[in-house]
Structures are given as structure tokens and as C-alpha cells.
């Protein structure tokens, strides 16, 4: 039976991503769902996109857009994102993309443009970078960037009283909409955890690859987890997004 793997934030760490995919060893018929933030941090952001474009030729891949990817897309279109972008990994992304020739740069731009804001599978499982604020679901989000910026969704999941049944009127409507939700965006290392976290029915797969952590993947049916080594050890002369 084909497997589906969900993969957390990457942040320009090509070496760690390649190591993780080797450890998963997906079969051709398997599905890989990436939760966004492919760029900004370590020095190989453009190379990560090149690798993902090639991976898409071998497997069924779904690419969700993250906030850093939206920043990078704006820059590629000649619109400089907010000033904090360069301080949050954007400088390394600029240097990486400046190595591309015009045709490669155009291909990478199109790849970013075509990323999905979210994906819902046949089992009513939602895959999204950050979250959503509408009680009717991400399709009804009035402010599109919330889908890759919002942190209240994960905070809501963390705060849910486990004694409240899912069919209760008191259970948060946003969480009750889906069987499971898979997100990135907020590193588990912020909570002292180096592996994916679960709160209510929300799985957070971001394990801090941009900082001192690893890239993580999970089989969404068996819940088995794979991880790369710590990213910083693969780029010893770089800081990533570490201060």
C-alpha cells in the first residue's frame, strides 16, 4: 500500500533534506507532502528548490507554501519584502539564487508561484504551513497570508482541555473541522522538544531546522518519525537563522 509522508520546514538545508529522504527511502508510488519554508536560513535555498523539482519527477509531491517562500517569491518578482526578511535568512537566499542563470531563476519562480496554500486529503486531513483563523476553514480565510503566518492555531491546539469531547459545543470549531491537521511554522524546539509535537488533533512537524534542530518527516498513517541529523553540524561555518 502506498505511504504518505509529511515533511517539515527545511530552510535552505539541502544536505539535511537529502539525508532525510535517504532515510525515509520512499517508493515511487508514495506521496511526499512538504509543509513549506524551503528557503531562508542555510546557504542552499535555491539548491533545495532544484532538488525538490527533481524529486517531483520521481514521486507524487505536494508543496505547501510557507511565509519564507512567499517572501522569496516577492523578491523574485522584484518586490522587496519587509526589511526583516534579510535578517531572517533572506540574505543567504539572495546569495543562493544569484548563482542561477535566467532560465533556472524563472523555473524556480514558477515553482514557488504554483505551490498550494493548503491541501485536504480524502480522509479529511489538512496540511497547511501555519493555520487559519476562520471557523469555517482555510477556504474562507479573508486574509490569505494568515495561512502561512498565523500562530494562534497552534496555540489554540496547545491550550485545548483534553477533557472536552470533540462533539461538544465548547470544542474549538477550527479544530473540529478536520480529522487531523499537519502544520509547520512554529519550531518544536521553542518548547524544548526536538521531535514533532501533537496537541489535540494537530501535528506540528517543524523541529527547528532553521536554528539548532533537525528536519523531520512522519508517516501520517503509522505516525513513524524520521529525522535528519542536526542541521548546524552539516553547515559548521554558517549560523542559519541562529542569532
Image (spheres, rainbow, N blue to C red):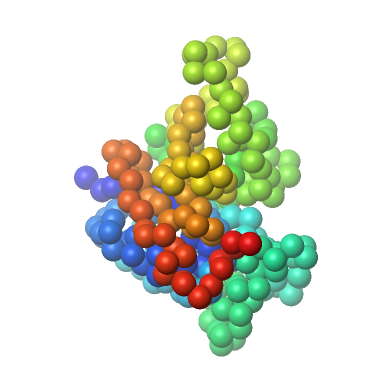
Report the number of discs. 0
The image quadrant where one finds the N terminus is top left
- Between 51 and 1, the one nearer to me in the picture: 51
Q: Would you say residue 49 is visible in this rendering?
A: no
Q: Compared to 177, does 43 lie above or below?
A: below
Q: Compared to 82, does 143 lie above or below?
A: above
Q: In this view, which residue lies farthest toward the bottom?
A: 101
Q: Quadrant of residue 138?
A: top right
| Residue at left offset 47%, top offset 50% | 207
Left or right relative to 135: residue 62: left
Left or right relative to 184: residue 142: right
| Residue at left offset 54%, top offset 58% | 211
| Residue at left offset 61%, top offset 80% | 95
Q: Quadrant of residue 40?
A: bottom right
Q: In this view, which residue lies farthest toward the left?
A: 1
Q: Compared to 217, does 115 lie above or below?
A: below
| Residue at left offset 28%, top offset 59% | 23
Q: Position of residue 62 (x, y in %)?
A: 45, 55
Q: Position of residue 100 (x, y in %)?
A: 55, 84
Q: Position of residue 59 (x, y in %)?
A: 33, 61
Q: Position of residue 7 (x, y in %)?
A: 42, 52
Q: Would you say residue 109 is visible in this rendering?
A: yes
Amino acid at each position: 500500500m502506498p505511504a504518505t509522508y509529511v515533511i517539515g520546514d527545511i530552510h535552505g538545508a539541502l544536505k539535511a533534506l537529502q539525508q532525510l529522504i535517504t532515510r525515509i527511502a520512499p517508493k515511487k508510488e508514495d506521496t511526499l507532502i512538504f509543509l513549506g519554508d524551503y528557503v531562508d536560513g542555510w546557504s542552499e535555498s535555491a539548491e533545495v528548490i532544484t532538488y525538490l523539482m527533481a524529486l517531483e519527477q520521481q514521486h507524487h509531491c505536494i508543496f505547501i507554501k510557507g511565509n519564507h517562500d512567499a517572501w522569496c517569491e516577492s523578491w523574485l518578482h522584484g518586490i522587496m519584502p519587509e526589511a526583516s526578511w534579510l535578517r531572517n535568512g533572506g540574505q543567504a537566499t539572495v546569495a543562493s539564487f544569484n548563482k542561477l542563470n535566467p532560465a533556472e531563476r524563472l523555473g524556480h519562480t514558477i515553482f514557488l508561484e504554483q505551490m498550494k496554500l493548503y491541501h485536504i486529503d480524502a480522509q479529511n486531513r489538512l496540511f497547511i504551513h501555519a493555520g487559519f483563523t476562520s471557523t469555517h476553514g482555510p477556504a474562507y480565510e479573508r486574509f490569505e497570508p494568515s495561512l502561512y503566518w498565523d500562530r494562534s492555531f497552534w496555540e489554540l491546539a496547545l491550550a485545548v482541555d483534553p477533557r472536552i469531547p470533540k462533539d461538544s459545543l465548547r470544542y474549538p470549531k477550527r479544530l473540529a473541522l478536520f480529522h487531523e491537521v499537519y502544520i509547520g511554522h512554529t519550531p518544536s524546539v521553542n518548547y524544548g522538544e526536538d521531535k514533532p509535537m501533537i496537541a489535540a488533533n494537530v501535528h506540528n512537524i517543524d523541529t527547528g531546522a532553521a536554528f539548532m534542530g533537525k528536519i523531520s518527516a512522519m508517516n501520517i498513517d503509522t505516525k513513524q518519525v524520521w529525522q535528519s541529523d542536526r542541521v548546524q553540524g552539516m553547515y559548521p561555518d554558517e549560523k542559519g537563522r541562529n542569532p
